[in-house]
Image (tube, helix red, strand yellow):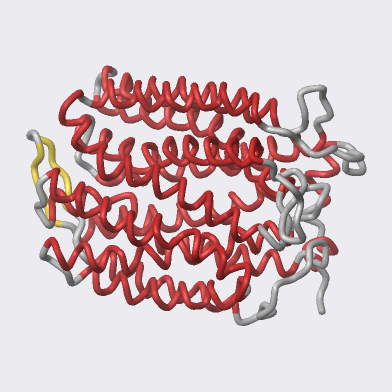
Amino acid sequence: MTSTPSSSPWLTRRVWAALLLLGFAGQLAWAVENQFFNTFLYNHITPDPRPISWMVSATALVATLTSIFMGTLSDRTRSRWGRRRPYLLAGYLMWGVFTALYPTSAQFHPIGLAIAMAILFDCIMTFWGSTANDAAFNAYVTDVTTQQNRGRVTGALEIMKWLSVLLVYGGAPLLIEAVGYPAFFYGVGALVFLVGLISGRLIHEPPAGPKPEGTYAQQMVAVFRPANLRRNRRILLVLSAVTLFTAAQNVFFPYLLIYLQHYIKLETLQYSILVAVAILVGGMLLAYPIGLLVDRWGRWPMAMLAVIAEMIGLLLFSFSRSFLALTLTGILWLAPTAAWTIATMAWTKDLFPQDQRGQFAGIYVLFYVLIPQILGALTGGWLGSTFGIPTLIDGKAGFIPTPLLFQVAAFATLLAAVPLFFLPRKNTPIGSLSED
């Protein structure tokens, strides 16, 4: 692949293949963890939404700490295997193993111990997944792209994300009905393990350059010093917007399939088709064109448009009851989610300091995972148990989430617009993190 003004000399066909494979397998594993770990816990251990919120919050903390510490370590790694490759390879292999082990948590008794083991297994899986994907993979994407093509590459990876989500949300419920949860988790774990083995041989890393100054501990501390925080004001504003938008998403998203199954009372085939159509249209078909527009229009206009469209889409979804209306309004909130993700991920990568990309990939997780998942999931769990419909499932008391979750999330989404008003409307050159 020849280099052009809008391409990186490191973005070869081989690297493209590795990016797409790793992006697909990683997002597949996260999609399973984000939804079907929740439904497994709800349907096979306890139909109480609160343990889901505890599990989401615990794994968010693990993901954040792992990403920051392991991302910083990858910045400082100089080995014959490369800077990011050792973490990608080991991370994906162990990620697959612990995905396969998750359903064994239901074998523990009493219920309290089973809940604790489910959360523990999820945390261990999250450690390896965050090492591989959140820290090493995101830093590697930044290493091999430029500001001119980062939106396009992010859009292509977003297609892999929605393809994996399409397979998981559209096909997994039917597959689980046919083979059961254990076989399903075994299959996903094996796929992630295999992709890690294959892609580890494909990636080609740019020269690492000199190590960041100081020791590992000094690098960890320096980024939080007031002078550096002021210099990194723009990236902190983007990350603040990411936190607010994603917190709103986490109010409803962990409970989406539970809502469709138990409140709307859709059959498995119905909500599988609904989710598949929404993902195919709102995510996969639009992701790459959105990535091109993010490079052409800029990060700010696409992010602001996504905030407004997301609020409208979620409100309309909350009032929908028919299969057709739910499908159409599902597209209306899913497409802005894709647009927001592409715009803000490209934007933050533009602003990562070049010798600290692994560390800042971890800091991104602090704002993208830890804070919003704790705020959003705990809010959703509280809304679900306080305003939900009391129910009995397999003789166990619980609550069914209601449309209130989507309505609260819709208005909470608008808060993400506030930090955007303090940011420049045009793309910021890499390395120019100081004030205008």
- State the image coordinates of residue 273 (x, y, percent, origin top left): 20, 50
Figure label count: 0
Q: Quadrant of residue 130?
A: top right
Residue at image position (16%, 45%) is 398
Name the quarter where the C terminus is drawn.
bottom right
Name the quarter where the N terminus is drawn.
top right
- Note whether 117 is above or below 150 in the view shown: above
Left or right of residue 336, residue 435 in this image? right
- State the image coordinates of residue 209 (x, y, percent, origin top left): 89, 40
Q: Is residue 247 visible?
A: no
Left or right of residue 337, residue 156 in this image? right
Q: Quadrant of residue 283?
A: bottom left
Residue at image position (75%, 43%) is 10
- Note whether 336 is above or below 138 in the view shown: below
Residue at image position (49%, 22%) is 194
Give the camera-side residue of 406 and 224: 406
- State the image coordinates of residue 212 (x, y, percent, origin top left): 88, 43
- State the image coordinates of residue 360 (x, y, percent, origin top left): 71, 50
Residue at image position (12%, 66%) is 321
Q: Is residue 132 visible?
A: yes
Which residue is situated farthest in the front direction here?
Answer: 2
